[in-house]
Image (cartoon, rainbow, N blue to C red):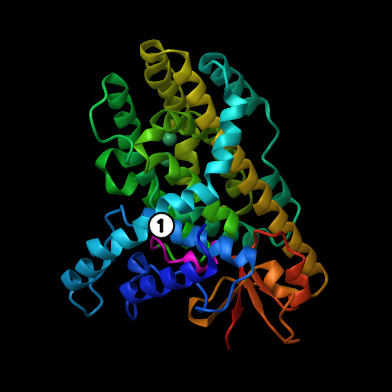
């Protein structure tokens, strides 16, 4: 089990590797805390998720938009230093075991003996018949919707600003005809090589329209524990080749659910933010119909045909793990928005985008109880500032904030 002391050491090493004034894409810092000061369980869990995200991000090719007045080659060598990467990687299996494996075990129990064909058919019917997703339905009823939506975009950006980079890791290698179907889905995600149509580039446009930085990893200080858990669950699947069939289950669930949720977001944006760029959502509402069919017919079915029913159950387990992770993240996002809405109504919160220059100490709701400064200001994700520690203490446990330093 990784302790608070271990996380503090990991955090210090990542801060050294990051160096001063890092470009956002190469900022590896985490909220590891001080050596010797044992963090609260909720802060420790948050920092562990950050460390696991850093281990996963090290597998990506990332470049800043500009050299920023220093040698890009020197910074590149430093960011991808193999000894530093190996030292973090040594903790990865332990972090995965601690943070994600229990949810996988639960999904496997649920999926035991199930067949993927009927499962996929029922899932698609359910998704299409479902009412509007609760988050966009909530937004319709509040005048503060812009701020809630900004937080949604920010929390989702952990993955979407590098969309499909996780699943790309599951495509390299050599594994027959299903590999080529997965590759065709992947190249759609990358805009078929037209940079302006790459899904992450479309996502950047919405981020900008809501006043957020669009550089990958720029918003990491504001990711809450639920957003990190979703990110890490996806990477846990794709960064471990032993999870190949679970990866197919992820794609089955994600493509099916996305065709519907993006339609809700597309309609919502058109109605309430008519000047915002809707291409990201419009594109998915269309193309994920095809991706769903491809996963079912060209990947899952031939794999079950070739390898038998245990593979079908494993695919269902991957889908159920993904469903549970999406459901938790979605319910959490809505609960945090509702808590913030109540705080506004009580005169104890002000909507505002996060100010990266005024970034103070990290806080979970449980840790906020220990604060005795009466005039503390706590930025909660992309939502705004809560002006009473006791108010933030009543937020959902996986919310995350930072004091605002004047
Ligand atoms: Fe996509
Ligand atoms: Fe897709």
Q: How far from the left and from the top, in percent, is residue 14?
A: 37, 70
Q: Which residue is mark 1?
A: 91
Crowd tier of the residue under label 1, counting other residues whose Cα lies within 10 Å: few below 14, some 14–19, many 20 or above: some
Q: Is residue 179 left or right of residue 222?
A: left
Q: Is residue 88 left or right of residue 374?
A: left
Tell me the chief SS of the magenta region: loop
The question of residue 71 being in magenta is answered with no
Q: Residue at x 60, y 81 (%)?
A: 404
Q: Is residue 180 left or right of residue 299?
A: left
* Element class at badge 1: helix
Q: Is 35 drawn above or below residue 89 in the view shown? A: below
Q: Is 163 drawn above or below residue 68 in the view shown? A: above
Location of residue 171 by image quarter: top left
Q: Residue at x 76, y 52 (%)?
A: 141
Q: Nearer the viewer, residue 202 or 406?
A: 406
Q: In which quadrant is the C terminus drawn?
A: bottom right
Q: How far from the left and from the top, in percent, is residue 347?
A: 80, 75
Location of residue 349 by image quarter: bottom right
Q: Nearer the viewer, residue 74 or 345?
A: 74
Q: Residue at x 37, y 43 (%)?
A: 239
Residue 31 visible in image: no
Instruction: Name the residue furthest right.
Output: 346
Q: Nearer the viewer, residue 111 or 324?
A: 111
Q: Is 74 drawn above or below residue 94 in the view shown? A: below
Which range is magenta? 215-223
Q: How far from the left and from the top, in percent, is residue 145?
A: 67, 58
Q: Is 348 drawn above or below residue 55 in the view shown? A: below
């Amino acid at each position: 089990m990784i302790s608070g002391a271990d996380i503090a050491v990991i955090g210090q090493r990542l801060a050294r590797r990051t160096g001063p004034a890092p470009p956002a894409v190469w900022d590896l810092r985490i909220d590891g805390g001080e050596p010797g000061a044992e963090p609260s369980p909720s802060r420790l869990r948050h920092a562990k998720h950050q460390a696991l995200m850093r281990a996963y991000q090290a597998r990506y090719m990332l470049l800043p938009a500009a050299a920023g007045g220093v040698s890009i080659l020197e910074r590149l060598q430093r960011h991808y230093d193999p000894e530093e990467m190996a030292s973090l990687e040594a903790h990865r299996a332990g972090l995965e075991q601690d943070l994600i494996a229990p949810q996988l075990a639960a999904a496997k129990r649920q999926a035991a003996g199930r067949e993927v064909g009927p499962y996929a058919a029922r899932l698609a019917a359910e998704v299409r018949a479902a009412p509007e997703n609760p988050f966009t339905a909530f937004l319709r009823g509040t005048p503060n919707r812009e701020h809630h939506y900004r937080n949604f975009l920010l929390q989702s950006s952990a993955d979407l600003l590098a969309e499909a980079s996780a699943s790309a890791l599951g495509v390299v290698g050599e594994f027959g005809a299903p590999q080529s179907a997965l590759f065709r889905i992947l190249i759609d995600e990358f805009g078929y090589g037209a940079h302006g149509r790459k899904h992450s580039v479309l996502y950047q446009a919405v981020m900008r329209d809501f006043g957020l930085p669009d550089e990958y990893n720029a918003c990491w200080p504001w990711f809450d524990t639920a957003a990190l858990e979703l990110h890490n669950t996806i990477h846990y699947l794709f960064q471990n080749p032993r999870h190949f069939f679970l990866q197919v289950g992820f794609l089955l669930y994600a493509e099916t659910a996305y065709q519907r949720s993006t339609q809700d977001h597309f309609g919502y944006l058109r109605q309430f933010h008519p000047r915002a760029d809707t291409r990201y959502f419009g594109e998915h509402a269309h193309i994920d119909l095809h991706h769903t069919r491809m996963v079912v017919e060209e990947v899952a079915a031939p794999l079950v045909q070739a390898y038998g029913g245990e593979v079908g159950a494993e695919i269902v387990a991957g889908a159920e793990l993904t469903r549970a992770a999406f459901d938790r993240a979605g319910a959490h996002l809505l609960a945090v928005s509702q808590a913030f809405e109540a705080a506004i109504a009580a005169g104890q919160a002000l909507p505002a985008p996060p100010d990266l220059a005024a970034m103070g100490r990290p806080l979970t709701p449980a840790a906020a109880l220990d604060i005795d400064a009466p005039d503390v200001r706590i930025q909660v994700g992309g939502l705004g500032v809560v002006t009473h520690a006791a108010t933030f203490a009543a937020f959902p446990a996986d919310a995350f904030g930072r004091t605002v330093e004047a």
